[in-house]
Amino acid sequence: MSENPDGRKVALVTGASRGIGSAIAARLAADHYVVGSATSEAGAAAISSSLGDSGTGLVMKVEDDSSVAAGYTWLAERSLAPLVIVNNAGITRDNLLLRMKPEEWQSVIDTNLTGLYRVIKPALRAMMKARWGRIINLSSVVARMGNPGQSNYVASKSGIEGFSRSLALEVASRGITVNAVAPGFIETDMTADLSSEQVEMMLSRVPLGAMGSVDHIAASVAFLASEGAGYITGETLQVNGGLHMS
């Protein structure tokens, strides 16, 4: 079963407890029954509270095979088969490569990139049976630009874009689209820790002269999840205020 009792398609949004993920979950809840994942029970409870009757929270650690498997078991027990998947969960472990510890490299790749494999694969069968699906993976502007001290993160985000193009080719005949969204400089709780000088320096490189909002990203994801985006696949939508154009 791919729809919840009121007939809306089920959307799974990973990393939905705050920031961009929370905004995406809230936006999709207008048209979908949203299952938002978090890494803790408290985070999942907060998602449930925020979504109300439009969705629920779920503990799912995308870097952990058993956690993802348990999450899909939980969904199956409730007859919730996602036809929309938004892979937003991600981490950073910044360091110059010369000083980067093996675990700093591996944890980022395992969460940001291998996490896609873990989350998407179990959902594909239901999408293929329905002959409809929307997969949206969150990349980053740095996937195209590069960024010193983030070789692990940039590698994971570049991999996401290549992964998305390859999977798009595999599943297009079944009516499933696969796209990426690459945010630029977005105002979140993480950017709130930047100094005014750091913000000013970054904004000097953005032609639109302002940080983006989480709502800009949520609107882009909602479009790619819609019926209207059914002829778009294998693309990366750059949402960066002109910071990088390609």
Image (spheres, rainbow, N blue to C red):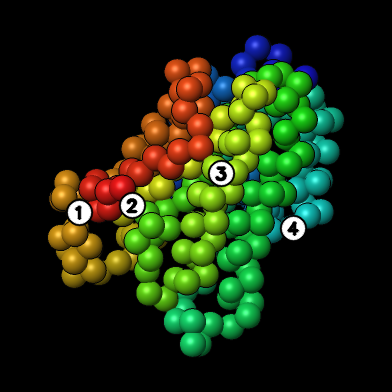
Closer to the chain start, of discs 2 and 4, is: 4
Q: CA distance from mark 1 to mark 2?
A: 9 Å
Three-letter amino acid code of the residue under disc 3 = Ser
Q: Which mark is residue 206?
A: 1
Label 3: which secondary element: helix
- 189 over 124 or under it: above or below: below
Three-letter amino acid code of the residue under disc 1 = Val
Residue at 81 percent of width and 46 percent of height: 69
- Say if mark 3 contacts mark 2, CB within 8 Å: no
Residue labelled with disc 3:
164
Q: Nearer the viewer, residue 193 or 142?
A: 142
- Say if mark 1 contacts mark 2, CB within 8 Å: yes
User: Residue 202 appears at what percent x and percent y?
Assistant: 22, 62
- 105 over 58 or under it: above or below: below
- Say if mark 2 contacts mark 4, CB within 8 Å: no
Closer to the chain start, of discs 1 and 3, is: 3
Horizontal side of 59 relative to 226 (left or right) equals right
Label 2: which secondary element: loop
Q: Quadrant of residue 189?
A: bottom left
Residue 55 seen: no
Closer to the chain start, of discs 3 and 2, is: 3
Q: Quadrant of residue 45?
A: top right
Q: Which mark is residue 184?
A: 2
- 170 over 146 or under it: above or below: above
Three-letter amino acid code of the residue under disc 4 = Asp
Horizontal side of 183 relative to 78 (left or right) equals left
Q: CA distance from mark 3 to mark 2?
A: 19 Å
Q: Nearer the viewer, residue 60 or 87?
A: 87
Closer to the chain start, of discs 1 and 2, is: 2
